[in-house]
Amino acid sequence: MTEGGWAISQSQRADATHLHLLFAKGKRPDRAAVRAFAARQQAVGLSHGLQSDDVSLDDIVPAGQPIWAELLCDGLTFDLSGFAPGLPSAFPAIAHRFDLAELPAPDAYEALSIMPGPHLIAGARSLPVVRAMLALAKQRVAEGRPLIIFPEGTRVAHGHREPLQAGFAGLYKLLRLPVVPIAVDSGRAYHRAVKRPGRITYKVGAAIPAGLPRADVEARVHAAINALNG
């Protein structure tokens, strides 16, 4: 957006749609401004890239890279990129303008981009999502491909034990396949503001046969994937 008018940009990528917000030079928001905005909104939250118990990410600026964050809104995620003081997003090609005497130019404005993210929040149990997931799983199995999932629905911080999501039991019953549980302790290094080097251990559990009652298979899988979660 510019002062006194609107500009609509068109993404140069064929597989994604971007919305670009244009700011006068030096006026792009930083992460603190976005954090304050989200705190005032009931339907908006923030996920990755803004803060940590260990260190303030506002003090960490990757040299020569844009700064980004993930916005959560109404069950969907949106990736925001181009925060100050990092690099702005690439200046867009303007498709249309409204109430502007001339097109905004990159020598006077800087861009922050918003695009749909890859995750669903609070929508994982909706019937259309579940149906689409099951249909895709059946198709992949028919092609002879293995399926790898996070049965808790997402990554879990080391030391935490989250319940399995209903989608796991649905896939297990529908596909009638054995399950090989795998435990991994990468959360020791991964779930930090600053990623730290370290050894990652995988533990492959014994295969669990198909056809077990839901409570039984869920208990066995939950125990096995948390084998390294001490």
Image (tube, rainbow, N blue to C red):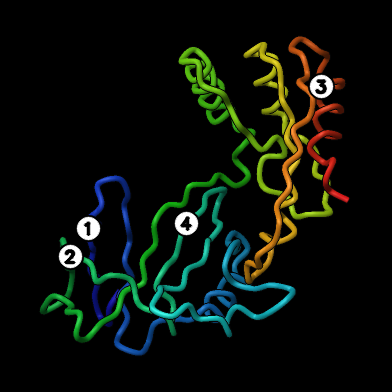
Comes first in the chain, label 1 or label 3? 1
Residue at 42%, 68% in the rendered image: 81
Image disc number at residue 217 = 3
User: Any mark on residue 10, and which?
Assistant: 1
Q: Disc 4 designates what residue?
A: 78
Q: Residue at x 69, y 61 (%)?
A: 198
Residue that sits furthest to the left in the current view: 102
Mark pair 1, 2: CA separation: 6 Å
Question: Residue at left 44%, top 65%?
Answer: 80
Instruction: Report the Cα–Cα distance between label 4 and label 1.
Output: 17 Å
Circles 1 and 2, Cβ within 8 Å, touching? The answer is: yes
Q: Are marks 4 and 1 in contact (CB under 8 Å)?
A: no
Q: Position of residue 86 (x, y in %)?
A: 42, 80
What separation in Å lies between label 2 and label 3 (alpha carbons)?
Answer: 53 Å
Reading the image, the residue beneath label 2 is 93
Say if 53 sits above or below 75 in the image.
below
User: Are the residues tagged 2 and 3 within 8 Å (C-beta)?
Assistant: no
